[in-house]
Amino acid sequence: MVHERMYARTFIECAFVGGISIASRKEVAELAGVSEATVSRVLNNVGPLKEETKERVLAAALNLGYTPSSLAQSFARRRSGNLGVVMPYLPKARLFSTYYFSEILSGIGSKAREEGYDLLMLFRNAEEPMDYSALFKMRKIDACIVLGAKEEPGELASLRRLKVEGHPFCLINQHFEGEAFYEVDADHVEGSRKAVKHFLDQGLTRIAFLNGPVSYSNSRDRLTGYARALEESNLPLDDSLLFEGNFSRKSGVKAAKEMLPLLNEIDAIVAANDRMAIGLQQGLQELGIPKDRIPAMVGYDDSDAAELTTPALSSVHVPFYELGEIAVTKVLELLGCSLSETATSSQIIQIKLPTELVIRASSIIMNPKEE
């Protein structure tokens, strides 16, 4: 360890002189007595390697001035300097253009940069669970933030394994009941309840609900909020008013066709995100429904697009940017804990930020019904 720290410290001092590679990988390999492939694995922190081999390669690179200072720093602190962000892989979906992902990633990126970390974007295979543990074993990442996790056996097993092995990770906008995971979320139960109550206060009682897939906890939370608001007003839950999309605009257009036969019985609609709400508005218009006959509507997320619709879309504001920032802060706090502390902790740590209903023209009834 003394030699290792000496190599790193000396190299950092040397690298600041210029930081320019003046030797080839082949020369480093020859001096260290290893293959070029081994040099590559050491320099990229990939795969299991003997500590003695790493020290020889780093020492050879130091002597030849081959590597930049950031590598020596990484080696000295036993970390990659990368914060992994796991994203769902959705073919043909422009994830980075969606408000949800762009806001969360902006918050993550801003805080990560402030803390001196780079982001490594990772996309899970839709066909099989992701082996999160392997990412840590290969030293690709120091900590991990998971977006788009689902309530599926394979996903849960992978996350439990991370927990058992003591790796620092955090879930955003998803929680698993009874699991001791670190979760950063928004209060979707209350957000949905407020949206429904907004219509109930105007005397509207036949309120349709367009939800997302129930494999996501935020969808279940929104359904809970919807049902709670009805219960508080002594209204029954009518299954015929429940619809499901996949958070895309196209699924909102599809839902319009499903709602059309019941449209005369629907006073208002709450959608689980703005994209579906906008798709629903467009779908109803394409089916020949005039704008003034489209039921009052509230979306969810309070995206930029909500203000651009006609009429402007009321929506539940979710602090996605702040969720991203907090997730980075908390997962780096976990990184500072020992593996044994992280692995043995049975505490369920759930941070839940408040949501807020933003009222615009789409949900205001000019002549509210009398109670």
Image (spheres, rainbow, N blue to C red):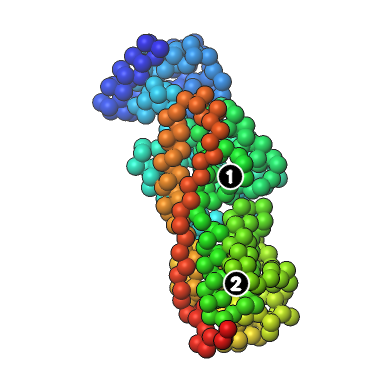
- In space, the residues marked 1 and 2 are separated at their CA atoms by 43 Å
Q: Position of residue 319 (x, y in %)?
A: 44, 57
Using residue 125 as the reference point, say whether residue 112 is left or right of it.
Answer: left
Mark 2 is on which residue type? Ser
In the image, what residue occupies the spot 67% across and 52% down?
215
Tell me the quarter of the image containing the N terminus. Answer: top left
Q: How many marks?
A: 2
Residue 263 shows up from this direction: yes
Q: Nearer the viewer, residue 57 or 110?
A: 110
Residue appearing at x 50%, y 26% in the figure:
341
The disc placed on residue 35 is none
Amino acid on which disc 1 is placed: Phe
Residue 237 lies, with reference to residue 350, above or below; the image says below
At mark 1, the secondary structure is strand
Q: Is residue 267 above or below residue 50?
A: below
Choose top left, top right, bottom left or bottom right for residue 95: bottom right
State the quadrant of the C terminus: bottom right
Instruction: Reply above or below: 150 against 32.
Output: below
Identify the residue at horizontal 45%, vertical 49% (top origin). 324
| Residue linked to disc 2 | 233
Image spot of residue 182 (x, y percent): 52, 40
Q: Which mark is residue 123?
A: 1
